[in-house]
Image (spheres, rainbow, N blue to C red):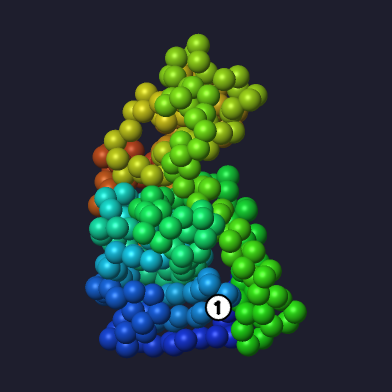
Amino acid sequence: MPAKRSALAPLYGNCLFRSDERVAAHDYVARELIDHALRWKRGRPDVAMYKGQANRLQVYLLQYGAEVEVTPQPFDDFTLVHTSLVGAAEIESDGKRIELAEGRTAVLAPRQRLLLRWYPGTEQLIVKVPHALMRDVLASDEDQPLGLAPGFMLARAHGAQWSLLLQSLLNMTTMSGGPGDAGLSQAWLDHFERNLALFLLSHQPDALSAGAPAAGGEGRMGPVGDEGAAPLRDAGDGRMAALMEYMEARLCAPITLEDLARAAGTSVRTLNQLCHRHHGVTPMDLLRNLRLDAVHARLRLQADLSITETALAFGFGHPGRFAQYYQERFNELPRETQARVRA
């Protein structure tokens, strides 16, 4: 998980509010982050918000308790980085759809429209990064567009680095009364915050293309044919990471084996070898397992969901076959998962 519970402990000492009143909860969150429309759905409201302040960075721990649908105004002068500590969320940022699973991180800078659906029991760690800080890092003028992607999932390969940055940030935000206390100089805080902003800027989806072009030009992952595929020992990890990101972003969409090969930048034959090497299954079996995991997580978080509708939403069109796959993977039927949650 990107932020360990022990690292979060100091945040709990600065609770901004805790409430089961819907109107009060909306007002508190809007005051700290941005005005938004909030639609309450299933579950009992149990809203809590905790805050840490460094120099220019702010970090929040937020939970709603119930399932909610949040529609904020577009962000003009900051980016939000959401790390799902418990539970999951669906995000649509300027038409970009993101399935934010537990333990994953999404970077959001919408210019037109943002919609977030939090499942019941979800807790998220949110870092508010001012665009003024990013402009300082880039040495760009105030009126110059930053060119940020409206929304993207931080790659799994970068999760460990982000976790370290988060834990350092949490330590800095809870040093007694304010930034600069406990021997931390403003110069060091500024240096750290600039590094965190640089990390986010460097891992934008188009960060590579914005600099020097990679070998191979537009097709930097290599063509689908074997001739242009790099040896497995050189590029296997990177291609598997690209494949996982592609599948996780499209769990609810129709995907063919050829689509997966194209996403990994290799041939179908090489992709089969990679998947067997890293996961011991075929590419389509790997996709099915990811979808089963998503269904399992959804049923654990929302025990009153329709099993059939949830399975259909993740691409399982045959109920009998779905139940068989589910039992093979989790050693129980979907209804047994729901029964355990209700117990």
Percent x, y of residue 236:
58, 28
Percent x, y of residue 107:
44, 56
In the rendered image, the vertical position of residue 174 relative to residue 272, given as above or below? below
Question: Can residue 24 be seen?
Answer: yes
Q: Quadrant of residue 274?
A: top right
The residue positioned 71% from the left and 76% from the top of the image is 184
Q: Answer left or right for 11 relative to 39.
A: right
The residue positioned 65% from the left and 24% from the top of the image is 233
In the rendered image, the vertical position of residue 163 relative to residue 257, given as above or below? below
- Residue found at the far right of this picture: 183
Q: Nearer the viewer, residue 19 or 184?
A: 184
Question: Can residue 306 be seen?
Answer: no
Quadrant in which the N terminus appears = bottom right
Number of marks drawn: 1
Q: Answer left or right for 35 relative to 2.
A: left
The residue positioned 63% from the left and 87% from the top of the image is 177
Badge 1 element = strand
Q: Nearer the viewer, residue 26 or 327?
A: 26
Percent x, y of residue 212:
52, 33
Percent x, y of residue 33:
38, 75
In the rendered image, the vertical position of residue 47 relative to residue 76, given as above or below? below
In the rendered image, the vertical position of residue 133 relative to residue 216, given as above or below? below
The residue positioned 67% from the left and 70% from the top of the image is 187
Quadrant in which the C terminus appears = bottom left
For the residue marked with disc 1, what is the amino acid? Answer: Gln
Q: Quadrant of residue 193?
A: bottom right
Q: How many neighbours does mark 1 have within 10 angstroms: few (below 14), some (14-19), or many (20 or more)?
A: many
Q: Answer left or right for 204 relative to 190.
A: left
The residue wearing badge 1 is 53
